[in-house]
Amino acid sequence: MRWFRAAHDASAKDANRSSSPIGAERDPKRLVTFSDAVIAIAVTLLVLEIQPPEDTEHLLRGLAELWPSYVAYAITFLLIGQMWVNHHVMFDHIRSADRMLLLLNTLLLMVIAFLPFASSLLAHAFESGHGKRTALIFYGATYVVAAILFNVIWEYARHGRRLLTSATDNDTARAISRRFRPAPFWIVVGTALGALHPVVGLVVVIAFIPFYWLPIKGEVGSIQRTREQSRGDT
Amino acid sequence: MRWFRAAHDASAKDANRSSSPIGAERDPKRLVTFSDAVIAIAVTLLVLEIQPPEDTEHLLRGLAELWPSYVAYAITFLLIGQMWVNHHVMFDHIRSADRMLLLLNTLLLMVIAFLPFASSLLAHAFESGHGKRTALIFYGATYVVAAILFNVIWEYARHGRRLLTSATDNDTARAISRRFRPAPFWIVVGTALGALHPVVGLVVVIAFIPFYWLPIKGEVGSIQRTREQSRGDT
Amino acid sequence: MRWFRAAHDASAKDANRSSSPIGAERDPKRLVTFSDAVIAIAVTLLVLEIQPPEDTEHLLRGLAELWPSYVAYAITFLLIGQMWVNHHVMFDHIRSADRMLLLLNTLLLMVIAFLPFASSLLAHAFESGHGKRTALIFYGATYVVAAILFNVIWEYARHGRRLLTSATDNDTARAISRRFRPAPFWIVVGTALGALHPVVGLVVVIAFIPFYWLPIKGEVGSIQRTREQSRGDT
Amino acid sequence: MRWFRAAHDASAKDANRSSSPIGAERDPKRLVTFSDAVIAIAVTLLVLEIQPPEDTEHLLRGLAELWPSYVAYAITFLLIGQMWVNHHVMFDHIRSADRMLLLLNTLLLMVIAFLPFASSLLAHAFESGHGKRTALIFYGATYVVAAILFNVIWEYARHGRRLLTSATDNDTARAISRRFRPAPFWIVVGTALGALHPVVGLVVVIAFIPFYWLPIKGEVGSIQRTREQSRGDT
C-alpha cells in the first residue's frame, strides 16, 4: 500500500501548500471552451428526444400531436442558450480557475447535460397525458439545481475577490450577483405552481426566458471595458 | 418578492441605458465558435437517423431500400454545410454581438438543430410511401424559417451599420443582402411545388444547393480585405 | 422572378471575376476547426452503435457475443483518427480555402460522418452471421470514397500550387501525394478480397492502420518548418 | 504494386530519418483541442443512455426506479471530468506531439469514448438486478485501461525528457508521475472487490473521485510558471 500512502501524503501536503495565492490555478480559457462544447452538444442532442410518429399513414395528425415535444424543445433550447450567455458573463470576470471552481463547474455541466432527459420526460408526459405534475417538478428541480450552482460558482469566485479579474469593479460583481440570485426562487415558484397546475407552472418557467435574455444592469460589457482600459493605457 | 422587484427594476433601467452605443455588446468570436459547434453536431447527428435494415438475411435489398435515407442525408448535410459557410460570410462583417443578435442567433441555431428530425421524417416518408407531401412541406417549412432568420440577422446588423465592422463597405453589405434575400422565396416555391408533386419540390430544393455554394458577387473575401488593409497601413 | 434573375446574374458575373487570384478565398483555420469538430463527433458517436445485450441474465455471454461490435468500434476509431491526422498534415500546407475546397471538404466530412452507420452495419452482420460480404463491401466502399476525396482535395490544392502555403516546398507536396495515392487502391483490394472472404478483407483493411499512422517521408513537420523560417528571418 | 513498394520504402526511410530530434513532431494544441472535443461529447452522450420509464401512468415510481442510471451518470461524468483535468495537467508539460504520442492519445480517447457504453451497462445491471458483478468488472476494466494509458503517455513523454517543455522541471514531472501511478491499482482493487460484492467495489471506485480532484503536490500551475518565466525574462 506504499503508493496509497504516498498519494495520500501528497494531497495532505498540498493542503498545506494551498496558502500560496496561486497554487494550482490555471487560465479559465480551456474551462470555458470545454463548457461551451458540453452546452452546444446538450442543446443539439435535444432533437434526438423527439420521436417521429409511428403511424406514417396519418403523418399530419401524428406531427400535430407532437406539439409538446416542439414546445419542450424550444423552451429547453432557449433556457440552455440563456445559461450559455450567462456562463460567459460570469467567466468574463473570472481570472483563473482553481480545483474547486473546476469541480463546481463540472457539477453545473453535469446538470445542464441532464436537461435533454428532463425535457423529453416533460414532452412525453404532456403527449401521453399521464404524469404531467411529476414530469414538471422533475424538470423544474433540474433547473433549480443549475440555478443554485450558478450562484454558488459566482459567489465562490467573488468572495474576497478570490478569482475576479482586476478589471472587474465591485459594482459589476454585485450586478451579476443581483442577476443570478432570483433565478432559483423564480423556478421554485414555477415548479411549485406546476405541482398544482402543470400549465400554469410551465408558463411561469417560460416567463423566465425573456427576463434572463435582457442585458445585466450595471454590468460593463467586455468590449467596452477593454476599450476603456486601452484608453487608460495610452 | 423583493428579489423580483429588484430584478425587474434592473432590467427596466437597462432599457434606459441602452442609449449607450456600446451597452452589453461583446466580441462575436464566441458566438461564432458556439454556432460552429452546434452546426457541426447537427450535421453529424444526421447519420443517427438512418436506421439499419432489420432483415439482415437480405441485407443488400434492405440497404438498397434505404435510398431515401441516403438522399436525405446528403441533401441535408450539404444544405447545413451551406448555412455554415454563409454564417461565416455574415459574421466576418459583424463587429460585435448585442443581446438581440444573441437571441436571433440562438433562434437560428434552434432551427438548424431541428433539421435532423425534419430530414429523418422526409426519409421515412419516402421509404414507407406515406405522407410524402406532409413530410416535404414540414422539411421545407423548417428551411424557410432558417432562411428568414438569416435575413433578419443580417438586416438587423446592417441597419444603420449597427453592428458592421468598419472594414465592411456598403457594397459588400448590399451584396450579402442580395445573396440572402432570394433564399426564403426559393424554398417556399420548392415547398409549394412539393405539395403538388413531392419529387418536383425536392428537385427545386436540391437545385438550391449549387447556387448557394457559389461565391458572393461583390463580396470581398476576408483575406483580400486584410491584405489591402495591411497594405494601406504601411 | 426578379430576385431569381438578380441572383443568377450575380453568380454569372462571379464566374468572370474569378480571374482574380484571390476571389472569395478565406483563411482555412475555421474549416479545420469545423472539420475537427465533425470528426470528433463522428468518432464519439461510434459507441452509440453498440447495443447492450438484451438478455441481462447471461450478461457475460451477451457481452462476449458483442465482439464484432468492439472490433468494428476499434477499427473505425483508429481509421477515423488516422484521417484526422492526415487531414491536419494536408491543411498544414494549405494557405487558404476557396469555395471549391469548401465544397470538397464538406463532401469528405459527409463521408466521414457516415462511417458510424457503415461500422454498425459491419458489426451487426458479423453478430448475426448474415450479410457479412455485403456489409464489408459497403464499409469498404465508404472508405474508398473518403480516400479518393483526400486525393482530390490535395491535388486540387497542389495543382499549380493553387492553394499551397509559400513555406511548402515541392518535395513536401509530392511526399504527401505519394502518401495519399495508395489509400484508395489498398482499400479497393481489401474490399474485393472481402467480397471473396470477409475476414481476409477485414484483415487487409486493418493492415492499413499501422501503415498510415507512420510519419510521412520527406514531409517537414510544421514545428521544424516554423523554426527554420524564424531562423531564416533573423 | 508500384505504389505499395513506394509507400513501403517511404516509411522504411522514415525510420532512418527518425534520428532527427524533431521529425514529424507538431504542436500539441490541436491534439488537446481534439481530445477536449471527444471528452466533452462522451460526457454529454451519457444522458442518452438513461431510458425514460415506459409506464407513464406511474411516472414517479418509474423515475425512482431509475436511481442506478442517475448514480452511473454522476459517477461517470465526474470520472471523465477528472480525466479531462488530468489530461490538461499532462499536456501543459508536453511541448510537441510525435506520431507515437498521437497514436497513444487516440487509444486513450477510444477508451474514454467507450465509457458511456460501460456506464449504461452498469446502470441497467443494477436496475434489472442481473449481472451486477459482470457489469462492474466490465466498467472497472475500462477504467483500468484508461488509467494505464494515462501512465504510458506520460512516461513516454517524460522518458529522457523526450517531449517535455523546457519550463517543466524534473520535480514537477515526478509529481505528475506520482499522481498517475496509483490510479490503475486503485481501480483494480475496486474492481476486484466488486467481483466479490458489487456495492463495495462501486464505493471504492467512487472514493477515487475526491482524491483525484485534489491539486497535484509539487506541480507548479501553468499560470504561476508563466508568471515566473516572464519575470525571469525581464
Image: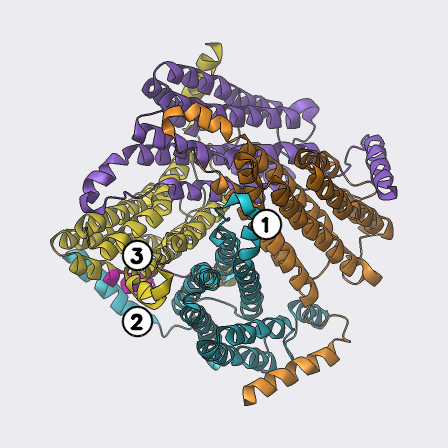
Chain colours: A yellow, B cyan, C orange, D purple
In the image shown, does B125 or B25 lie closer to the viewer?
Answer: B125
Q: In the depicted view, which residue is nearer to us: B167 or D203?
A: D203
Which of the pair B23/A191 is nearer the observer? A191
**How far separated are the C-alphas under marks 2 and 3?**
15 Å
Q: Which chain does the residue under circle 3 lie in?
A: A
Query: What label sits on residue A175 in the rendered view?
Result: 3
Viewer-nearest of labels 2 and 1? 1
Is D205 on the left-hand or right-hand side of B211? left
The answer for how far apart the CA atoms under marks 3 and 1 are is: 63 Å
Residue at mark 1: B60
x, y (%) of residue C43? 56, 43
Magenta stretch, residue numbers: A206-221
Q: Residues within 10 Å of mark 1 (few under 14, many from 20)?
A: some
| Residue topped by disc 2 | B15
Q: CA distance from mark 2 to mark 1?
A: 63 Å
Q: Considering the image in quadrants, where does the C terminus of chain A appear?
A: bottom right
Residue flagged by tag 2: what amino acid is it? Ala
